Amino acid sequence: MALSDPALGELADRFGISTQFYDWKGRHTQVGEQTVIAILAEFGVDASTPERARAVAQRVRDDHWRRIVQPCVVLRAGQEGRVDVHVPAGAPVSLRIVGEDGNDHLPWQVDNWNPDRPIDGRMIGEATFGIPGNLPLGYHELIVTIGTHDADGSEADGGIHATATSTIIVTPNRVGLPRRMGASRVWGYAAQLYSVRSHHSWGLGDLTDLADLCTWSASQGAGYLLTNPLHAAEVAGRMEPSPYLPSSRLFVNPIYIRPELIAEYHDLNQYDASIIESLRTTTLDDDPQALLDRDRTWQAKSQALELIHRVDMSASRRMAFTAFRVARGRRLEDFATWCLLSELHGSDWHDWPAELHDPHGAAVARVRREHADRIDFHMWLQWIADQQLSTVQSSGTDAGMPVGLICDLAVGVNGSGADAWMLNGLFAREMNVGAPPDPFNQAGQDWGQPPMRPDVLEQMAYAPLREMVSSALRHAGGVRIDHIMGLFRLWWVPRGLGPRHGAYVRYNHEAMVGVVALEAYRAGALVIGEDLGTVEPWVRDHLASRGILGTSIMWFETGPDGRPKQPQQWREHAMSSVTSHDLPPTSSYLRGDHVELRDRLGLLTESVDEERENARRERETWLASLRQQGVLEADEDDPEQVTLAMHTLLTRTPSKVINATLTDAVGDPRTQNLPGTEDEYPNWRVPLSGPDGEPVYLEDLYSSDRAARMAKVLRG
């Protein structure tokens, strides 16, 4: 059933709001009018009554004619384009394109028979121009110059009425696999870095541990290592444990820095060095099974980093730091300013004095001047993190990995954090991103992240997305994009209504996917899209056509009859694994622990007996399939052997990228994250452990027979 108000439906379509969808049971579902009205309000549209909706609908029909030129044009390599220009009726207009390389290119005018139109009391004409198809890949500037008239209607000599600019983005048709991979398949581990502690880290895994983990993985034959998002979190107050709810996707969390490997650490006096060692010991638990404590680690590590920051740098180091600051530009200074203001006023910028809400206002400029040393400290932290992250990638590739590190890009950010402050107008303030109900999360999900507005993204020529992807690939051989459907549509949840009462909002996927492809192409990187859950079938086809890999999880690879697919039926262009960080480790899943845990926490909407029976049937179906494929003996049900058999089955698929979680490699039974929970379960705080619950340290991996058996299976 359609919306009762046609004007409301027109506005929803105009702003990309889907008013209906199919739920996880295949049922056609209509979005409520309350939801549509709330989402339209985020676009500055008051559709609260039918009268207001009709008035706004009339206005937005002419919005295209109110702007001289659209802010952004996205083309594929070799594709000619068209762009409409709106000028005072009869006024002369000229266009030129300044390429990224500085060369000029000339558009040409094409026929446009649309009549002039009265807009806001004056007649506006429309002219259309062609964009040449030989523009190189990259970001180019289109400059529009509108001339003036003499009284007789002729063009005035040298007069300019107005100018406007637009960005032309030319993207590759296809990214494909990195040249270093060739035509071969690669396999690798997925690790939650914070959980992989060494005997030298500060209570959490850090970038030095990650470099060593890359080296060890390469020694086992792995071609890459996938890690959780390393995005920046809060620097004051409680640090959000979820790496998927960061403060900024443009910068790195300095909690991952190893202080002892900073060059200036070795120039400390003996007293300060002893203080740092004492600080490190405060991060170590007497009980090695205790949950991870980011706040304790950051409190100690930040004090150590402050001591090191006070040490004078050599001239060459100072030059390198200056070069980093220049390369990262104003955004780095803005981020450091947010860190400072968080320390002064708390981590939620909404609670700051109103004069500090504008990152480019006079009050913020004054704070920058008054606290220049502290801002320098936070910029220095990013430089140090950048250096240590560079070492991670080189450790992997130097050890023989064809890809190296694959970083994870979260789907969104914390609305109280740095990105939301720096890019103030980009995010919808009264909305959160989430997901509609699905079999594993039957109440739906609210991820607590404000979505980016598609209209503002276009106005900014997708610069924020460009920065995010290029930052992720700065020192990595690949990027995994969490919930890549967000490049096509996102489930917007109006605050207070709950995830069941959300709606999909569409994005310009040709532009969004194109920008990702362009940045990855330039970096020579692998791109993996997490395309699980409710996905329109054509989305996967589109991603595959652009050379972006999908994600396949064994538990979900079933046919229409619910039975496991044959290995040869799996996708070739995908990263395939048995499980993921959002699902229990394989041994735990086989036991049905996920059902008992969700029942205990009240997350089931179906009866627990029904869910137990479903889990039992699923387990028996997979065991039968493994035996039928000849990878599991008829009477074998040992959890490790079943886990190895499932990974053996992975190697028989055509998938170009195979993945195993580090938890499966060591037999850890505990899940890292239970979607739909916050404090009910210790998400993102579980240390890597063995099947007996005892901690597994990085050094333990080097001699782990169990991990060696997993690597042998994955090598094929």
Image: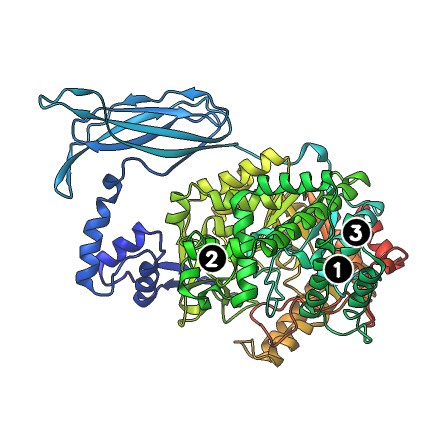
**How many numbered marks does the figure carry?**
3
Q: Which residue lies most toward the front here? A: 370
Quadrant where the image shows the C terminus: top right
Whichever of labels 2 and 1 marks the residue nearer the N terminus, that label is 1
Q: Which element carries disc 2, helix, strand or loop?
A: helix
Q: Earlier in the sequence, mark 3 or mark 1?
A: 1
Q: Is residue 287 above or below residue 671?
A: below
- Picture quarter with the N terminus: bottom left
Callout 3–callout 1 Cβ contact below 8 Å: no
Percent x, y of residue 277:
82, 64
Q: In the picture provided, is 153 more to the left or to the right than 354?
A: left
Query: Circle 2 is placed at which residue position?
Result: 421
Look at 40% across and 49% down and name the residue there. 454
Image location (x, y in percent) of residue 336: 57, 54
Query: Which residue position holds label 3?
Result: 261
> In the displayed structure, would residue 688 be above or below residue 88?
below
Q: Label 3 amino acid?
A: Leu
Q: CA distance from mark 3 to mark 2?
A: 32 Å
Secondary structure found at label 1: loop
Give the spatial CA distance, label 2 vs label 1.
29 Å
Q: On the rendered structure, is 176 left or right of 352?
A: right
User: In 3D space, how far apart are the residues under numbered discs 3 and 1 (Cα atoms)?
Assistant: 14 Å
CA neighbours of label 3 inside 10 A, class few (<14), some (14 to 19), many (20+): few
Query: Mark 1 belongs to which amino acid?
Result: Gly
In the picture of the structure, the residue carrying the numbered disc 1 is 205
Q: Give the residue displayed 22% in from the left and 56% down from the top.
A: 7
Counting residues from the N terminus, which is met first, the one under dot 3 or under dot 2?
Answer: 3
Q: Closer to the camera, 379 or 667?
A: 379
Q: Nearer the viewer, mark 2 or mark 1?
A: 2
Could you tell me if the residues under marks 2 and 1 are in contact, i.e. CB atoms within 8 Å?
no
For the question of whether residue 653 can be seen, the reply is no
